[in-house]
Amino acid sequence: MESEKKKSAVSDVGAWAINIISSVGIIMANKQLMSANGYAFGFATTLTGFHFTVTALVGLVSNATGLSVSKHVPMWELLWFSVVANVSITGMNLSLMLNSVGFYQISKLSMIPVVCIMEWILHSKQYSKEVKLSVLVVVIGVGVCTVTDVKVNAKGFICACLAVLSTSLQQITIGSLQKKYSIGSFELLSRTAPIQAVSLLILGPFIDYYLNGKFITNYKLSSGAILFIILSCSLAVFCNVSQYLCIGRFSATSFQVLGHMKTICVLTLGWLLFDSELTFKNIMGMFIAVLGMVVYSWAVEAEKSSNAKTTSYTKNSLTEEEIRLLKEGVESMPLKDVELAESKE
């Protein structure tokens, strides 16, 4: 039993590590690919279509070679999920374009309480005071180290709200679909990736044209840009798989809270690799955020052990009650019945 718990703990750490490393890696690769100082590939939505195309191909090869098994999920649920996921991607890109960086970061931070509220509404999930407090600490910490100028406009606010709601719903749906159909993270991803790939490759160029006024067909590809696109797509496979894996193992709330470790890693690597400014305010915010994550992890584990004890106590109480009823039944049993029972033995 203890060895199984250790294996599970190692798997959990591995899932988080893959998600953080691949997510930070893809952000760094995309920064070089999309920035004006890099290759100026300003087609984020179409690039996401490339990501899901490669992920879908990996899924098809895995199913064909028998490394994974394709399980049945109703097509309407796959389409519904893909629509929500694509709205999330488009909403995030529009929010980043229409809002200031400060308000964009605030909208991303608001996903944690939104996910909590959605899980409470959809799945009647309850949170302890310790968990709520730790979530607040994480939000404050990441807010301190990332939020700078905050400017709001009507279009940007609507896009941000749409992005936050769709992203939160998407992450909750990943977990619920895995539980509902007893399907693994990679199996679910291999079913949804082709739908997202096709839709984003068709709609992506038009969305990107609205965002930056350029069509991807007018972009001149260089060998360096192709290399970084391939790197970005490769990292996206690990990022997508680990996201589904983490949400399936934990919850959408945990994914959001501990996922902000990626923000801290990105800020640190930006300072180390791209000479980005790292102020005392950034460092203080990082420290508060990490403290909040540590407290959150402790609070979740404490909540699990408390629930386990309650369940164990309930089971023991039921057993004692059953024993008492059995004793009463034997005592009230007529003497002849008891004698017959003994003779039968």
Image (spheres, helix red, strand yellow):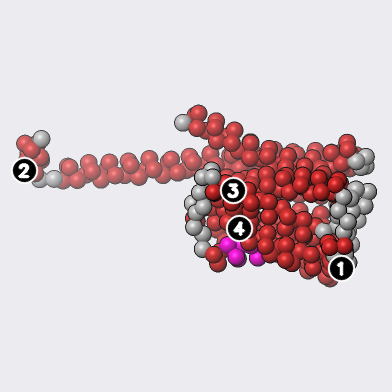
What amino acid type should be assigned to the residue bearing mark 4? Answer: Thr
Query: Which of the 4 image quarters holds residue 343?
Result: top left
What amino acid type should be assigned to the residue bearing mark 1? Answer: Asn
User: Residue placed at 63% from the left, 40% from the top?
Assistant: 15
Q: With 223 as the anchor, is 250 left or right in this view?
A: left
- Among numbered discs 4 and 2, the one appearing first in the sequence: 4
Circle nearer the viewer, 3 or 1: 3
- Among numbered discs 2 and 3, the one appearing first in the sequence: 3
State the CA–CA distance, disc 4 to disc 3: 15 Å
Q: With 169 as the anchor, is 101 left or right in this view?
A: right
State the CA–CA distance, disc 3 to disc 1: 46 Å
Q: Position of residue 82 (x, y in %)?
A: 64, 62
Circle nearer the viewer, 2 or 3: 3
Query: Residue 153, labelled with which disc?
Result: 1
> Element at badge 1?
loop
> Element at badge 2?
helix
Q: In the image, is residue 312 above or below residue 73? A: above
* Cβ–Cβ under 8 Å for marks 2 and 1: no
Q: Main secondary structure of the magenta part?
A: helix
Q: Position of residue 280 (x, y in %)?
A: 90, 39
Residue 121: say if magenta: no
**Where are the magenta residues, as a range?**
78-85
**Residue at the spot of label 4:** 192
Q: Position of residue 248 (x, y in %)?
A: 58, 48
User: Residue placed at 17% from the left, 42% from the top?
Assistant: 331
State the CA–CA distance, disc 4 to disc 2: 68 Å
